[in-house]
Structure formats: structure tokens, C-alpha cells
């Protein structure tokens, strides 16, 4: 092969590589997969097909409860306007491993993981900034990441923002006692009295939280559906999803249990009033009015306390903890409206 042919071959080869690189992002589908994040392979799914759309990094709840199956079932409408990056966090879903070091299961580590995922996304899609969105447990990671790395984010969207665990549990407990006493639910009253009221010196154990959430779900203030069997609908969604293999569906609750056990103690003493009083990116809080897993009353208090260049609090009527899948059209419309407002700041 002469020099001219070698040069032509190299040019064609480089051109093909460049085209493949473009297609990997610009094509009809953006392939999910594992990426190395701070020493652990973690899984990412991309909801959406147009790589030129605005990017949202979504931080799922739990801890340990990836919402990939739920967003794929209920929130496909987001793909019309965004690429939503669904990251399954360390110890959760496809990112669950038996031998994850206990020392890495901390809020601080998850914040650094979120930062690393952000850098990966920014580089992959050639963006200077992206939108950050957290739900429930994900809001604890989200607000800390936005506060620590504001240069990465155009805005932060908080869906059921965690702020002060003790206060949240107190509000939830009082609401449940009132509900149970009103209908003379003796079983609920007995279990609630056995749990007792949370306090600064007496945070709830994981077992106590589980009992509390059981009754929150029963009375329509828990995750996603205002009916006693709402949680079973979510279980069916995980079991029927095509995203997970049979064994991954089997491991899904293992990831939940693992994450809860490792992170509960730290979450139980959360008080953002003592940690974050200002954030340098626009913030949008969205909350279901009937949410008593993370009561709206507590989130509003923190919203009034925290300072930001732009703040907005949006209430969702007849909606509990899972506003994005309970009211997907209203949720999408609210996100688009807030982004349009933020763009003109």
C-alpha cells in the first residue's frame, strides 16, 4: 500500500469512527449501560432520543428504589422535550452488588457519585450545564450536590424535598393518629402508640419507620397512589418491566433493603436548616398536598428558609408522594413552565 492509499485509508477510518461516535448519541436510541463511578460500575438509562434536547439528571428515591420502571411506564411524555438520565445509584437496582463497602454508603459519597455522573453526562453530550432533579431521598443528594457544585446546574427541581427528618416524622405521626382515632382504627392506634412520637434524642429506627409508612400508605399519603393497594401497583410495575432481567427483578428488593439499612441512621438525623441556608442556582420545589411520607408542611418551611436567585413552590392537588407519575401531564407542564421562566432570568 503506497503512502497516498495509507493516508486515504486513515481518513476513511477516522471518518467512520467520528460517525459512529455521533450516532452513539444522535441516533434513534441512546443506549443504556454501566459506567465507572468512583470505583463502582453504576447503571444509567436515557429516557429520550434527541440528544439536542435539554438534559435532566434524575436522582431516584428510596434510598435504594430506582424509579426507572415507573418513569418508563408513566412519564414517556418527558422524552418529547428532554433527555432524562435515570441513574441507578450504588447499591440500588442494576447497580446493586453484595460487596459494596459499607464505608461508601454515606450521603457524602452519593453526592460525589452524583457529581461524577454529572461530569460524565456533560462530557458525553457536550454541555456546560444540565438540569438536576431529585425525588424523595434523591432530594437530599440533589440539594447537597447543587449547593456544592452550582456551576454544573441550570436549576434544581425538588420533588418532595427532604429537610428535617424529625419534624417530618412528627407531622406524619400526628396526621396518622388523627386519621386512626377518627375512624376508631384500633390496630393503627395501638401500633402508632407503640411507635411513639419522634424527637431529637429519639429518632425513629428503621423498623419504626416501616410501621409508620405502612399506615401512611393505608391512609393515602404514601408513595404514588391514594389507595391502600398503591404499593402493589408499583411492585407489579417492577415485575413487568422489560428493563430488568428476571434475576434483576429478584435483586431489586435486596438493593432496597441493603440501602435502607446502610443509610437510615444518617437520614434519620437530617436537618438541612443547620446545613444549607443558601443555594446559588434556581430552585423549584414540587409537592403533593396529600403527601405524608414527606409532609408538604415541612418542605414549605424549608423553602421559606432557604435563599436562592429564583424560587418557586408548586403544589399538586389530590396528589401524594409520587406526583410525577400520579399527574404526569401536569408535572411535565410545570417543569416546562418553570424552565421558561428560568431562561429569562
Image (cartoon, rainbow, N blue to C red):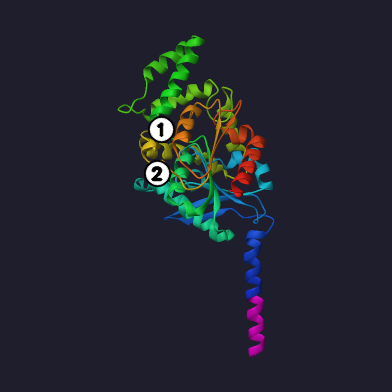
Label for residue 95? none
Q: CA distance from mark 2 to mark 1?
A: 15 Å
Q: Position of residue 286 (x, y in %)?
A: 55, 35
Q: Is residue 11 magenta?
A: yes
Assign the magenta stretch its main secondary structure: helix
Q: Residue at x 63, y 59 (%)?
A: 25
The magenta-colored residue range is 1-13
Label for residue 164? 1
Q: Earlier in the sequence, mark 2 or mark 1?
A: 2
Q: Residue at x 59, y 46 (%)?
A: 342
Q: Which residue is mark 2?
A: 107
Report the front residue among 93 and 245: 93
Res 10 → quadrant: bottom right
Q: Position of residue 238 (x, y in %)?
A: 58, 37
| Count of numbered badges drawn on the protein | 2
Badge 2 density bin: few <14, some 14–19, many ≥20, Cα 10 Å: some
- Note whether residue 64 is visible: no
Report the front residue among 243 and 202: 202
In the current view of this chain or complex, which residue is farthest to the left?
A: 201
Judged left or right of residue 99, residue 65 is: right
Q: Is residue 204 above or below residue 255?
A: above
Q: Residue at x 68, y 42 (%)?
A: 77
Q: Position of residue 5 (x, y in %)?
A: 67, 86
Q: Is residue 58 magenta?
A: no
- Note whether residue 281 is visible: yes
Amino acid at each position: 500500500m503506497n503512502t497516498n492509499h495509507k493516508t486515504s485509508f486513515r481518513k476513511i477510518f477516522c471518518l467512520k469512527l467520528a460517525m459512529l461516535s455521533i450516532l452513539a448519541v444522535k441516533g434513534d436510541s441512546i443506549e443504556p449501560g454501566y459506567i465507572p463511578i468512583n470505583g463502582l460500575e453504576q447503571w444509567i438509562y436515557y429516557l429520550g432520543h434527541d440528544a439536542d434536547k435539554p438534559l435532566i439528571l434524575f436522582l431516584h428515591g428510596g434510598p435504594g428504589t430506582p424509579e426507572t420502571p415507573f418513569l418508563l411506564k408513566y412519564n414517556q411524555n418527558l422524552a418529547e422535550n428532554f433527555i432524562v438520565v435515570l441513574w441507578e445509584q450504588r447499591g440500588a437496582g442494576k447497580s446493586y452488588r453484595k460487596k459494596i463497602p459499607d464505608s461508601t454508603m454515606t450521603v457524602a459519597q452519593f453526592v460525589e457519585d452524583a457529581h461524577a455522573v454529572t461530569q460524565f453526562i456533560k462530557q458525553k453530550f457536550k454541555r456546560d450545564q444540565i438540569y438536576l432533579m431529585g425525588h424523595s431521598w434523591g432530594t437530599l443528594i440533589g440539594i447537597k450536590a447543587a449547593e456544592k457544585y452550582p456551576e454544573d446546574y441550570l436549576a434544581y427541581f425538588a420533588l418532595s424535598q427532604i429537610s428535617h427528618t424529625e419534624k417530618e416524622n412528627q407531622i406524619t405521626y400526628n396526621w396518622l393518629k388523627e386519621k386512626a382515632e377518627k375512624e376508631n382504627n384500633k390496630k393503627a392506634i395501638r401500633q402508632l402508640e407503640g411507635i411513639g412520637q419522634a424527637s431529637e434524642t429519639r429518632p425513629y429506627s428503621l423498623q419504626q419507620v416501616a410501621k409508620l409508612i405502612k399506615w401512611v400508605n393505608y391512609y393515602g399519603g404514601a408513595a404514588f397512589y391514594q389507595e391502600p393497594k398503591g404499593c402493589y401497583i408499583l411492585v407489579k410495575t417492577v415485575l413487568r418491566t422489560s428493563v430488568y432481567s428476571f434475576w434483576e427483578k429478584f435483586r431489586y428488593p435486596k438493593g432496597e433493603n441493603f440501602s435502607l439499612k446502610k443509610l437510615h441512621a444518617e437520614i434519620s438525623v437530617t436537618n438541612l436548616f443547620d446545613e444549607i441556608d443558601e443555594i446559588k442556582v434556581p430552585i423549584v420545589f414540587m409537592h403533593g398536598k396529600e403527601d405524608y411520607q414527606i409532609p408538604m408542611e415541612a418542605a414549605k418551611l424549608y423553602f421559606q428558609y432557604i435563599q436562592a436567585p429564583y424560587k418557586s413552590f408548586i403544589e399538586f392537588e389530590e396528589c401524594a408522594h409520587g406526583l410525577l407519575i400520579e399527574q404526569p401531564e401536569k408535572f411535565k407542564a410545570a417543569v416546562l413552565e418553570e424552565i421558561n421562566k428560568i431562561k429569562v432570568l
